[in-house]
Amino acid sequence: MMGAGKTTIGRALAREMGLNFVDLDHEIVRRSGVAIPTIFDIEGEEGFRRRETQALSDTINQPNIVLATGGGAILREENRALLRQGIVIYLKASVDELYARVAKDANRPLLQTENPRERIAQLLEIRHPIYEMLADITLETKDGSIPSAVKRLKQALTEL
C-alpha cells in the first residue's frame, strides 16, 4: 500500500544486497514525462494502470534488481503473473499508519477525497487479501527502523 515504505525500504535493501533499485512509479514518470497526478487527470486510473503494466512488463526481467511497485499494481491479474516471476514482499501497515504517512501528500491521486483515511481503509480492504495471497514474505513495518526492516528481510530471503 501507499505509505508502507516500499521505496525507502526497497532502496535500503537493494543497497545492502548490492542490487539496483527500481521504483516503478518513478519509471512511469520518466517514460511519460509527467507526474502521476497528471496521468490520472488526463487518462484516469485505467490509463495509469495500462502504463503501469507496460512498465512492469518491461522491467520485471532486469537482472539484479529490487523493484518497488505502486500499491495498486496487484489489481491486474497480468501484473500478478509478472510479479510471481520474482520474490514478492508485502510491507504491511495499518490504516492509521498509512494515513499518518501519506495524508498530506498531494501526489496521491487516489486520496484526493474528502476523507482520505476512509479511502485508505477501502483500498486496503480490497488489496490486503491479494497482497497476502501474492506475498512470499510479509513484513510488518510499524515497529523498528529501516536498518531493522532490511535485516529482517535479508533473513527472510535466506530462509526461502
Image (tube, grey):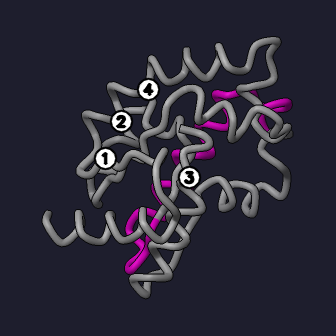
- Badge 4 is on which residue? 127
Q: Amino acid at mark 3?
A: Gly
Residue 131, label in figure: 2
Which amino acid, mark 4?
A: Arg
Q: Residue 80's x, y, as percent? A: 35, 41
User: For mark 3, what is the residue?
Assistant: 5
In the image, residue 55 lies in the stretch drawn in magenta: yes
- Image quadrant for the C terminus? bottom left
Q: Tell me which numbered mark, 2 or 3, is placed earlier along the sequence.
A: 3
Which one is closest to the eye, mark 4 or mark 1?
1
Q: Is residue 86 left or right of residue 107?
A: left
The residues bearing labels 2 and 4 have C-alpha atoms spaced at a distance of 6 Å
x, y percent for residue 151: 36, 71
Give the left or right position of residue 118, taking residue 79 as reference. right
- The first of marks 2 and 1 along the sequence is 2
**Residue in the foreground of this view, choosing between 106 and 59:** 106
Q: Disc 3 or 4, which lies upstream in sequence?
A: 3
Camera-nearest residue between 33 and 117: 117
> What is the x, y in percent for residue 48?
67, 37
Label 3 Cα neighbours within 10 Å, binned few <14 / some 14-19 / many ≥20:
many
Residue 138 circle label: 1
Where residue 79 sits: x, y (%)?
Answer: 41, 42
Q: Main secondary structure of the magenta part?
A: helix
Give the Cα separation between the discs numbered 4 and 1: 14 Å
Q: Amino acid at mark 1?
A: Thr
Quarter of image, res 125: top left
Q: What's the magenta region?
A: 39-66
* Residue 121 shown left or right of residue 129 in the figure: right
How many C-alpha atoms fall within 10 Å of the one at disc 1: few (<14), some, or many (≥20)? some
Would you say the residues marked 2 and 4 are in contact, meaning their CB atoms lie under 8 Å apart?
A: yes
Q: Residue visible at 82% across and 12% down?
A: 114
Amino acid at the residue labelled 2: Tyr
